[in-house]
Amino acid sequence: MATVNTIPEEFYFKDDGSIPNSKYPLLVYKNVFDLRGSKGGDWLEEHFAKNNWTNTWRWGVYPFHHYHSNTHEVLGVFSGSALLHLGGEKGKKMQVNAGDILIIPAGVGHKCIEHTNDFTVLGAYPNGLSPDLMKGEKGERPQTDNNIANVKLPATDPFEGNRGGLVKIWK
């Protein structure tokens, strides 16, 4: 599968008071795979599993700000497109399309603002971890801050394995 640019874009988000975000950047690989629909989902699942990112699911992105305090997450868009709001209310709105892969560090907020009817992602987690679901509500912190501080760096990038991506950028 040919890729045009395997250097991910980096996006940093500051703690906004309710969404903690991360010292690590959210990484976006734009248009790096060309399979669509269920074949694209199957390819992502196999490719991520080779790099030890498992516990996969296929769906969309919640329509409310949320984050995971106990694990990082990868989303591979294999169908449709969406406008996501990343990093909480003070974050960035970003259009994502089939062929894009987003690596979301623990603590970084994300939500879907609008999407095409066929928008579907495959989500996965390093070492098959099970994510918690935090919404930036009162009482979550400081426990979630402690959780985020204790999340280990993955040994591999879900897309590039041990060759690049988060392995080089997050070190």
Image (cartoon, rainbow, N blue to C red):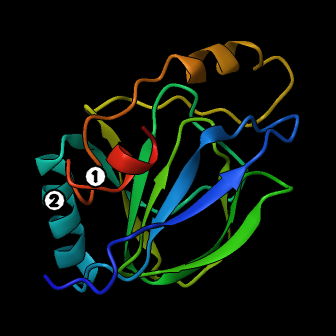
> Residue at point 44% right, 45% down?
73
Q: Position of residue 141 (x, y in %)?
A: 77, 18
Answer few, some or many: residues within 10 Å of disc 2's Cα (few below 14, many 20 plus, some between 14 and 19): some
> Residue at point 24% right, 83% down?
3
Q: Position of residue 35 (x, y in %)?
A: 21, 83
> Residue at point 12% right, 57% down?
46
Residue 156 lies left or right of residue 67; in this view the side is left
Q: Which residue is mark 1?
A: 158
> Residue at point 25% right, 43% down?
156
Q: Secondary structure at mark 1?
A: loop
Separation of residues labelled 1 and 2 (CA atoms): 7 Å
Compared to residue 145, the image places residue 99 above or below, namely below
Q: Secondary structure at mark 2?
A: helix
Disc 1 marks a residue whose amino acid type is: Pro
Compared to residue 57, the image places residue 10 above or below, namely below
Residue 55 lies left or right of residue 100; in this view the side is left
Nearest the eye: 99 or 161: 161
Residue 84 lies in quadrant: bottom right
Q: Are marks 1 and 2 in contact (CB under 8 Å)?
A: yes
Split into 4 quadrants, where in the image is the C terminus?
Answer: top left
Nearest the eye: 157 or 43: 157
Disc 2 marks a residue whose amino acid type is: His
Compared to residue 165, the image places residue 38 above or below, namely below
Q: Position of residue 44 (x, y in %)?
A: 22, 64
Q: Which mark is residue 147?
A: none
Answer few, some or many: residues within 10 Å of disc 1's Cα (few below 14, many 20 plus, some between 14 and 19): many
Q: Position of residue 83 (x, y in %)?
A: 65, 76
Residue 41 lies left or right of residue 149; in this view the side is left
Residue 30 lies in quadrant: bottom left
Q: Which residue is mark 2?
A: 47
